[in-house]
Every structure is written in C-alpha cells, then in structure tokens.
Amino acid sequence: MFRGAALGYAVILFIGVQDDYRHPWAAWAVLAGLAGWSALLTLWPRWHRREPAMMVADLAVAVAAVLSTRLLDQPERIHQGASTLPSIWPAATVLGWAIWKGRRGGLVAAVVVTGADLLELGRLRPRSAGNTVNNIVLLVLVGLIVGYATEVVRAGQAQMAVAVAERAATAERERLARDIHDSVLQVLGFVHREGTGQGGAASDLARLAGEQEVRLRTLISTGPIASPGLGEGDLSAALSRYAGERVGVSGPAQPVLVALDVMKAAAGAVAAALDNVHRHAGPGARAWVLLEDEPDQVTVTVRDDGRGFPAERLAQAQAEGRLGVSSSIRGRIEELGGTVEITGTPGEGTEVELRVPRVPAPPRPAARLGKRWR
Amino acid sequence: MPVPAELVGSGEGDDPAGAIRVMVVDDHPMWVRVVCADLTEAGLCVVATAADGAQALRRLAAARPAVVVLDLHLPVLDGVEVTREVIAAGLGARVLVLSSSGEQQDVLEAVKAGASGYLVKSASGPELIDAVRRTAAGEAVFTAGLAGLVLGEYRRMAGAPAAPGELLGPKLTDRETEILRLVAKGRSSRQIAQRLQLSHRTVQNHVQNTLTKLQLHNRVELTRYAIEQGLDAE
C-alpha cells in the first residue's frame, strides 16, 4: 500500500525533472524495476512470512535504487540536494524491517538507507545539508517508533494469548471438577460408607476409598483461586493436602498468602508433626491441623488425641539432646523468626503450635527466644 | 436395605411417634440412598428427598422436615440459596450442611445464611446420625472444620477496614475465641467444659453465639444492601 503510493510520488517528482536527468530512460527503467519489486512483494505470499532473505533483498533494492541516482542524475542537481530517484520509497523498507525485528530492525534498516543516501550525495555541502539531515532524522525516527509500536503490540498479543489460555485452562479444570464430583467421588464415597464397619478386607477397602476421596476432592477443589504474587504461596492449600481419614484440616475460607519460604517451612513442620502422630500417638489416634490467619503472622496448630507425654519427658529428652522430630520442627520454624510451643499431657494427646511471621524475619538471639517459650 | 420413595411421608402420622423428620437433598441418587438407609436404620424418619434446590423448596412445605440434610453442590439452585430460603420459609426446619471438603467458601456462606452446622461427606454414619439428632435438638453442629472457618471469618472482618457506610463486623469475646480455638483443634464441648471449668451448656451457648452473631450481621448486611438497591431504583 505504502509502497505503491510512495512509488507514485517518486514517479510524479521524476516526471517534473526528467529532462534534467543524465539518463532519463535508465531512470524510468529503475522506477519500473521498483514497481515490479513492489508488486512482487505484495503479491508473493512468502513476503508475509518475513523471510530473512527477502528482507535483505528488499534492503539491497532500496540501497541500489538510491545509489542509482548518482549514476543517472546530473552531479549538480545532486549537490544541490535534489531528492533521490526513489524519493520516499526506501522508507517502506525501513517500515518492513521495523515490523519484522522491532526497534532494532527499524534502526538497522534506517541506518543502512541513510548510509546509501550519504554515499549518493558524495559529501555534505552547506546547501544540501539541512534537507538531508532532516530526512535522515525522520527516517531513523520512523524506524524506531514503528519498531517500538510493533513490539508493544506483539507483547500485548502474547499476554492476551496467555490470558486466553489461562481462562481456557480454568474452564477446563472446572468442567473436570464437576465431572469428577458427579462420578468418581460419588462411587468412592459410596464404597467408603458401605464398607466401613463390615470388618476385614471390606473395611480396608472402605478406608482406602475414603482416603482417596478426600485427596481427590482436595485436588479438584474449586475454592477461590488464589493469585499469589511472586515468591508467595497459599499456605491453606498447602496444608489441605494433609487432610485424610484421621487428619482434619481447618482454617479460613480464603487463601492464606505467605512468603514461599514460610509456606514450605510450615508445611514441612506440619508433615513432621503428623508423621510423629502416626508413629507415637498410638493406634486410632486422630489429629487436627488448624491454620489461623493473623495480621502479620500465621499460627498453625497440630493436635492429636493420642497418648501424649509427661512434661518432664520433653525437657529430659531435650537435655539429652535426642528429640528428632521436635528439633526438626523447631529448626525449620526458628530459622524464619518463628516460635514453636509443644505441650503434652498424658492421655490427652500432644499439641504443637507454630507461629511464623508472614515474611521471614532474621532469627532472634537464642537467649531471648528461650525466655519467650518457657 | 429399605429404599425410600421420593416423597415418603407427606402427612403427619407417617412417622413413628417422636421420630425426627428428615429431608435429604443431594443430586446423587446413590448417595441419597445410603444416607436415607443409615438414617432410617437409626430410627429417624426420612420424609422426603430432592435432587435439586428448586425441588427441595417445592417439597419443603408438604414434607415439613425438622432437619434438612443438604448438599451444597446442587443443580438449579445451589445449597447456599436453598439454606436462605428454608430459613426464610419459617417452617422451623433447620439446615445441616453435608459438604465435600474444598467448598469452604460455600460452607461459610451457608452458615451465614442460617445453616445450623456442617459435616464433611466423609463423616461416618454414626457421626451423621448424631449430627442430625443434635441439629433437631437445636444445637449447633460445630465441627473442628466449621470452628476454623468461623474463626477465620471473624479475623477477616477484623482485618478488613470497613468501607465508608459499611457496618463494622461483629467481634468475638476472648472467651469465645478461646473456645472456638479449642473446638477447631478437635476437642468436644464436654472436654472443653472440663478444661475451662464451665458447664457443658455454657460452652455450647458460647459456640452458638458466635454463629448467631455472624448470621445476624449477614442478615443486616443483606437488608441494608436491599434497601440501597431499592432506593437507587426509584
């Protein structure tokens, strides 16, 4: 489009001055060649794919057309700053490059065409300088601006594509969740309910079905989708993975966003505490995990209704330096500036309470920590 | 296994004397069958079932249940809306939500709309029967999961700065917070009563209060919203 108009402009300019040219017929041939080239580019579908070879060829044609002026026109006219034979046509090449490779492409093409212009001129003379410099500045600006605009539009398109893909993924997830809810989960729930209390293998099957039901539900849960920032995670979702037949997890309905380190440490500590429950609290012990979302910290409590332990035993074990689980929990949490409190009563189970700042703080001096806990 | 018809007893006298009248609302026939069988076996009277929210509301007046055992994930009209309508109908029916985990926001909305309690679907048969009995008796079925949700909701209201013209959310007393936290960690109200040297009844009153305050606040907010919309429309 632009090429056609630019060429028309060049032809009109040329008709006005053709008698001044040294070789008017050769100049006509050059313009005809440009017309052919323009038509070729417009009609040839490969152009649309912006093949490198085509782009380089286009730039070469523009340069050649500009340089041909030097051979075909009168040197006096050139020195007076008369316009080149293709006039504004090379700007189309610059635009093409800007669209192809963004700002950088626009700049490269503009510089090359400018170089050809200067070469055609031979050397700058005061009479022609102003005009030429203006043209050069304009050409470079066009290359940069169009290149920049292209980049912005491309980035926008890419973001749009990502957003559309995300929306499609969410919709698909919801569809799957509905499907699973309406089919597999019902069957698992049924097996769980019917098999419980039948004894033997049926009970085991029921228990397994129940566990898988809870897992699957958690997996497809369609709660509000958290939009954690970079380096943040939803602790609520992380903890809900531990829910099961013997473990209840409760907390606020909204996602609880904390720093990623805090999420990992708290989830790891809860896993360690639950593991301890399974090992030591006795058969049939149940556990509850409670997540509380406070203004600048989160509190996570793991409680079981198992055997518990006398208070002295904890102190004694700690003094002897053997307290595997407890120290692994403390290690994780204190590193982030949090505190851990473990209480146990024989026959009433054990309670582990973790308090962690949302954003990790440097650990406080050990002496002060000790005072805070006891 | 006795399988109840869609509408078992539509009139008085069908239920054995004093049996608790229950309506089961769930869109999964298999699930409904199991729950009904469990309830019937325990001597409760399943007076109606419904497979979607609108159907539940249509059958409510005829069936006159004391307790509606309600799934939240329903076609046509969701569980939260059904809860609101059942309470608004003023027939004295209480709502016990039987939900899947991972629907926490919906559970909270249902409770704010007036549900008396909530139980996860994976709860055992005896747990369900106990919960239905307690709901019929007017007690809140306060599982650990519900206590965690309610605690979280009060904290959210305390943390969110009220918009201009918006009512300040209700607050928990220290005692209520203490009790809710104990419930959320899996303790029974009997254990809590023992620990805090309170009567069982007092503990339950505290727990019930936390729910009532939420429900009241919710109703006031809804009314305010309705009035604003109404005024704007004129």
Image: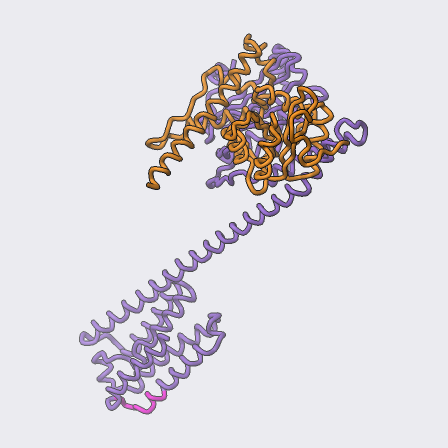
Chain colours: A purple, B orange
Q: Is the magenta stretch mostly helix, strand or loop?
A: helix
User: Nearest the camera: A354 or A202?
Assistant: A202
Look at the image and tell me whether residue A178 can be seen.
Answer: yes
If the image is split into quadrants, where does the N terminus of chain B sit?
top right
Percent coordinates x, y for residue A279 in the rendering: 70, 23
Percent coordinates x, y for residue A79 in the rendering: 22, 80
- Magenta residues span A21-29
User: Nearest the camera: B233 or A320?
Assistant: B233
Percent coordinates x, y for residue A370 in the rendering: 50, 16
- The structure residue drawn at horizontal position 81% and vertical position 31%, both measured from the top left corner, is A201
Task: Kindly give the residue lying farthest to the left in the view shown.
Answer: A127
Whether the magenta-drawn stretch holds residue A120 is answered as no
Q: Is residue A225 above or below residue A289?
A: below
Task: Kindly give the residue lying farthest to the right in the view shown.
Answer: A200
Q: Left or right of B159: which side holds A131?
A: left
Whether the magenta-drawn stretch holds residue A25 is answered as yes
